[in-house]
Image (cartoon, rainbow, N blue to C red):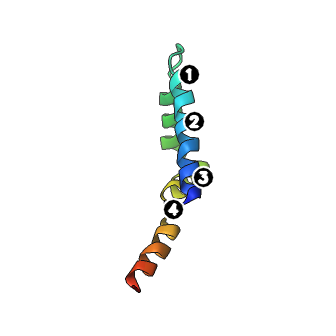
Amino acid sequence: MSHNAVFVRIKWIIVLLVTMVLDFLPVPVIGLILLYILLFRPLWFKNAVLEIYDQAGRDKRNSANDSD
């Protein structure tokens, strides 16, 4: 796993922890965020998923292993 992927995962874990803390308020924050993501499919969410799973980096490593 690359250094960038680890950083992105840590960043999103912190974001999720903050939203979990906010979810203790009377307004269900996580449910509203998930509803927004499901309805509007924002580009920032797609980019976050692509950063976390980084398919291009995985393909480069697999092709290097195949040549050995």
Within 10 angstroms of label 4, few (less than 14), some, or many (20 or more) residues?
some
19 to 8, vertically: above or below: above
User: Which amino acid is tagged 3?
Assistant: Leu
Residue at the spot of label 3 = 43
**Mark before the other along the chain sequence, 2 or 3:** 2
Mark pair 1, 2: CA separation = 11 Å
Give the image location of residue 37, x and y in percent: 52, 42
Q: Nearer the viewer, residue 7 or 26?
A: 7
Report how far apart the C-alphas of labels 3 and 4 lie in the structure: 16 Å
The residue lying toward the viewer, choosing from 5 and 68, is: 68
- Kindly identify the residue that appears in the image at 45 percent across and 80 percent down: 64
Kindly check if marks 2 and 4 are in contact, taking CB atoms under 8 A apart as contact: no
Disc on the earlier residue, 1 or 3: 1
Q: Which residue has dot 2 on it? A: 15
Residue 3, by quadrant, is bottom right
The residue that label 4 is drawn on is 54
**Image coords of residue 27 (percent x, y):** 53, 18
Instruction: Please name the amino acid that badge 1 sits on.
Output: Leu
Which structural element holds mark 1?
helix
Tell me the kind of residue under disc 2: Val
- For disc 1, the marked residue is 22
x and y percentages locating residue 20 in the rendered image: 50, 26
Classify mark 1: residues with Cα within 10 Å, few (<14), some (14-19) or many (20+).
some
Q: Is residue 65 above or below residue 28?
A: below
| Along the viewing direction, whichever of 35 and 16 lies nearer the viewer | 16
